[in-house]
Amino acid sequence: MSHPLEPIVALQKKDRRLIKLMREIRDIPKRKSDIEAQLAGSTQKLNMARDSKKHTEVSLKDLELEVESLNERIIKYKQQQMDANTNEQYRAFVKEIGAVEREIGGLEDKEIVLMEALEKGTLIVAECEAKLNGEKEGIADELGELDERSVELSEMLEQMKAGRMRSAEQCDQVILKKYTRIMNNKRDFAVVMVEAGGHCGGCHMKLPPQVINDARNPTKIVGCNFCGRILYNPPQ
Ligand SMILES: [Zn+2]
């Protein structure tokens, strides 16, 4: 007669494949969110580069306006200078105009620094944009593949569940109950082989000779004294 553990061992093989499959399905959303987080990081970098460039542009514009208003002041001084009645008044305007011109010189130095920063900022923005666009393309492919994989795995899961149900029907229901309880607890194997040398195939502890013999007997179902997994010792 065939051993009642044989259909259980076949069922266990299916269950292990099911567990692996369900794990892969479960991990897909995490893999997608990891990919999306990477994209969010690059988007944030681009936004920061754009903000920084904008800030430089605004500062430069402010400087230009300031220089413009100082130039207007010089024009006004020069008009007033022409209307000066005394040498003293005239010299006072020369002095004022000189001071404003020096102020303009200082601002123009600052403008040069800001223009260089703007050039650099423009370059950084372009680099960030190129990086982000490259990533977007790659990520769209990756996300698409993961979605496809998810559909594929879900279909496989349904088929495997149906196959599992058929296998379970062929098992001794009392042993199946015991198997299910141990499987839920151990999460790797519920039925293990007696290994060469008389060790448990689950916890690898040395088994008593009586247990090793009973594990071969189709009328007896024995558990490992140490880990509680069902032992099977099929005739070679
Ligand atoms: Zn054991």
Image: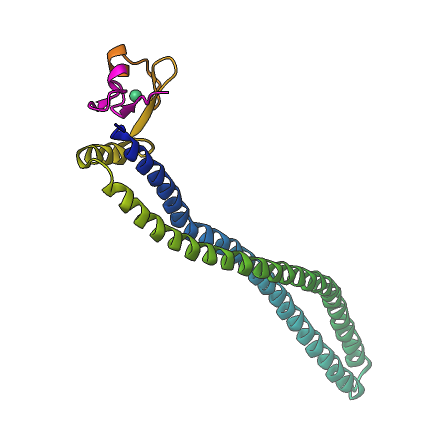
Seen from this angle, which residue lies furthest front? 1
Query: In the rendered image, which quarter contains the C terminus?
Result: top left
Magenta highlight: main SS: loop
Identify the residue at image location x=24%, y=33%: 179
Whether residue 121 is in magenta: the answer is no
Q: Quadrant of ligand 1?
A: top left
Whether residue 156 is situated above or below residue 190 in the rendered picture: below
Left or right: 5, with 45 as reference point: left
Q: What segment is highlighted magenta in the picture?
A: 213-236
Left or right: 222, with 55 as reference point: left
Residue 34's x, y, as percent?
A: 47, 51
Whether residue 213 is situated above or below residue 229 in the rendered picture: above
Whether residue 215 is in magenta: the answer is yes
Seen from this angle, which residue lies furthest top? 209
Whether residue 113 is situated above or below residue 175 in the rendered picture: below
Viewer-nearest residue: 235 or 12: 235
Viewer-nearest residue: 31 or 151: 151
Q: Which quadrant holds residue 110?
A: bottom right
